[in-house]
Amino acid sequence: MSAANRSTDWRRKQARKVRSDIGIERHDCLPQLCSRLSASVFSQMITRQAHDVAEPVIGETAGLNTDCHSDNDIFIDGDDQEMLSPTDSNSEQEKNDFEQIPQFEPIAIGESNSDVKIDCVQIAVALIALKSRHRLSNKCIDDILSLLGLLGIDVPSSYKALCTVLRKRSSTHLNPSKYTICPHCDNLSSALYECTTCGVKYAPILPSKIPLFYTYSISQQLKAILATSPDLSLVNNNCPRNEFMRDITDGSVYQALKKTQTGLLLTLTMNIDGVQPNKGSDQSLWPILLVINEIKRKKRFALENLIIAGMWPGPSKPSRTQIHLLFKNIMLELQELERGGLFQFYSSDHENRFELTKIFLIGACCDKPAQSIVQCLPEPTAFFGCGHCELMGVSVSTNNNGSVVSFAIYETDPPTNERTNERHDLLIKQLHRNAIELTASTYRGRRDLTDKHKQSEKGVKGPCVLRSLSNFDVGSSFLVDSLHNVYLGLFKRILSLWLSPEYKGECWSIWIRRNELSILLNRIRFPSTTTRHPRSLDKYTKYKGSEIRLVLLFGYAIFENILKPEYYSHLLLLVLIIHYAESRRLTNSMITIVDKLCRAFLIDFPKLYTSRHNVQVVHSILHISNTLRRFGPLSTYSTFNFENQLGLLTRSCKSTRRHAIEIMNNLMYLRDACFELKTGGMHYDLLKLVSEWLHMSDSYVVSLSKSVRISHPLRIIDRIVNTTFVGDINYYAVAAIGEIRFTTSDFASKKVSDDSSIVFKAGSEENFGRIRRIFTVNDGDPIFYVDVLTKPNAFQCTTGSQTYYYSNIQTGTLNEDADNAFICASDIVS
């Protein structure tokens, strides 16, 4: 008998002994007992366990678990042995242990589904989902399994066995390919302790000093997603444009791709970024993530649809050479996908549907440091640091005897070359010629020659790692990212200029009125769907991207009477730029306006704030219009989405080492659980519960987009309503139309959030107003009594002699004498 089976038998004997001691016996009615416990005791115990074990969260990063137990998904054989993932375990003993995992007796829960059995696979899916939702440790799952075993439910004996149950059934669980970088020849090696290129053994160099990274099969992950995803919109040259294509204006990169290709097409967007596995870690993980653009936007960035192409486990940021080696095999696979292959697609009638499909990487959305490494350009703060154009920049002195590179532009400046594939190829040739010339030069003239070469190379340090892809442009395919470029970059810098005591002597400073601004910001009422309400402006340096976004898009009005008129007018340009850029639909005329506004904003910036503060991140908004024209609204591909998923993955990491292995295994097991949910055959109640945990519930429930539900009845009488309508009138405080919640203004006045403001149609016109009453007459459909905004004024901003209006933002007054209207739910626009 193996050690694993002996351990399992011992645990079961101990459980039977404890049950005997406390008077619990196994009877035929035990499944009924379990069914009653599962709805109350089971959920309560799991919830209590999650609260007891989960570490507190500060901001968006989970705290480090200092439990002495190993919480990552690894096995340890001996104190000094290497820590390996389950996919790395190749011993015959472990294989035998996996094969001898017992088949657990199914249980039944719920009287209405008594004929449906819950087996060990469904329990494994539920616990994996619970682990992800509450960021539980592996030890916590072990304790839950012990508790369930004590209650007489046959479950896997440990988290290890639970994962094995899923992995043995899964066709999507992938093994990583490990590669090292030889310290002698700087080439790629598939061996861990020697170089397969030059044949030199790494010893006596410590293994921890040898750069190591992992890659995963992209095609296998694509096959798993395409075969199980019901949210995919298939497109070929004879089909209408799908949701992703409607987000993009005519003449976009997608349209150009369609004209040159035949058959079924899919496109990918890539992200690479450094992330800390936990708050106290000094490591920097660099995962390479891909998403399929043709999946509906709400599901595009879901964990089960996320493709992880590779991971650099640190401990520091990779160099340009290391990034090239990391992408070497990934690029080969992407080129193979461009040539096309046979893929099975999801079918609602479960028929085998195969299509010959070509898949292209068309965009990369990264922050500036990551983009510069992939593009093989200098740091963003250096000369020629812009990834979209060849603007050199000018060195400007700072107050502390330092200098920064300014990228200020002026009306008289000649146009700057855009970075394109053609320009990139020419500059690479120039780089080679310069290297030959430098080698042949004497030492005395080398410095002058180096300065000359920098001018001719335009910052190019080497070939871009993505240059060999057929539909990827080394300039415009790197998207302008709203999170890092606009919110955490440009606008946070402007807030610093206004509110930092360092600049309190400058003409633009409003530092002395920061308390007044905080009071005004606190008065703004955001809807309940707001992810994160902004904190006081005193804490702007700690703002997350979502807080800065709210201040810019909706809180800009608090600065109207605080800033000087010229600075407030300048701010309004940026507000309108981002409102247009994040619109649900874009037109060519809107993009043209964005381009004009961006240029006007950047020309005025050095006049207002001096060229010293016109750094590269300020300059980057010049290229927003080009990104919008090729790829659509910023919200379609923003790193907000990637950062959210990276946060979920890193918060699941509990170990103090081998973070990359643990994160990748957590993702694989979670994806296995998601795919099990989609295959069908699960208990309905359990399916519904787990789907809610994983935010997948809308894939299984009927859409409620047209349903109207009312709640919170009120004991009031409104004179106007009662004189207008005849019958039995009942008043309510809350109404929900689909998933959108609306409240009355009186109800919202007592809350932090306000859901009473609406846009509604009266005939063919759209109006702004606030809901005063929600009521029914003789239990009929809900009716909304709305106070209409009087004398509304559309948002406007001015550049020189031209004024721009934006009707989606209206200002006006509401009072007791305001116009009012009675509308139904179908009249409400948003």
Image (cartoon, rainbow, N blue to C red):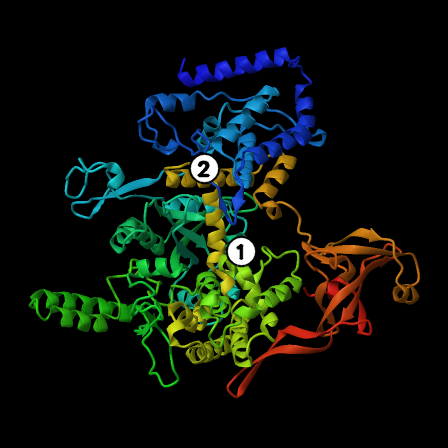
The numbered disc on residue 654 is 2
The numbered disc on residue 16 is none
For the residue pair 357 and 600, the one nearer the viewer reads as 600
- Residue 383 appears anywhere in the view: yes
Check the image and report above or below for 724 versus 133. below
Q: Quadrant of the C terminus?
A: bottom right
For the residue pair 238 and 395, the one nearer the viewer reads as 395
Check the image and report above or below for 134 versus 447. above
Quadrant housing residue 414: bottom left
The residue drawn where x is 50% and y is 78% is 593
Instruction: Give the crowd class for mark 1: few <14, some 14-19, many >=20 residues within 10 Å.
Output: some
* Place of residue 166 in the rendered image (x, y in percent of width and height, measured from the top left): 48, 32
SS at badge 1: loop
Q: CA distance from mark 2 to mark 1?
A: 32 Å
SS at badge 2: loop
Q: Quadrant of the N terminus?
A: top left
Instruction: Give the crowd class for mark 2: few <14, some 14-19, many >=20 residues within 10 Å.
Output: many
Circles 2 and 1: CB distance less than 8 Å? Answer: no
Q: Which residue is mark 1?
A: 296
* Place of residue 123 in the rendered image (x, y in percent of width and height, measured from the top left): 56, 30
* Place of residue 140 in the rendered image (x, y in percent of width and height, measured from the top left): 52, 30
The residue drawn where x is 61% and y is 19% is 152
- Residue 192 appears anywhere in the view: no
Judge left or right: residue 700 versus residue 654: right
Judge left or right: residue 551 versus residue 748: left
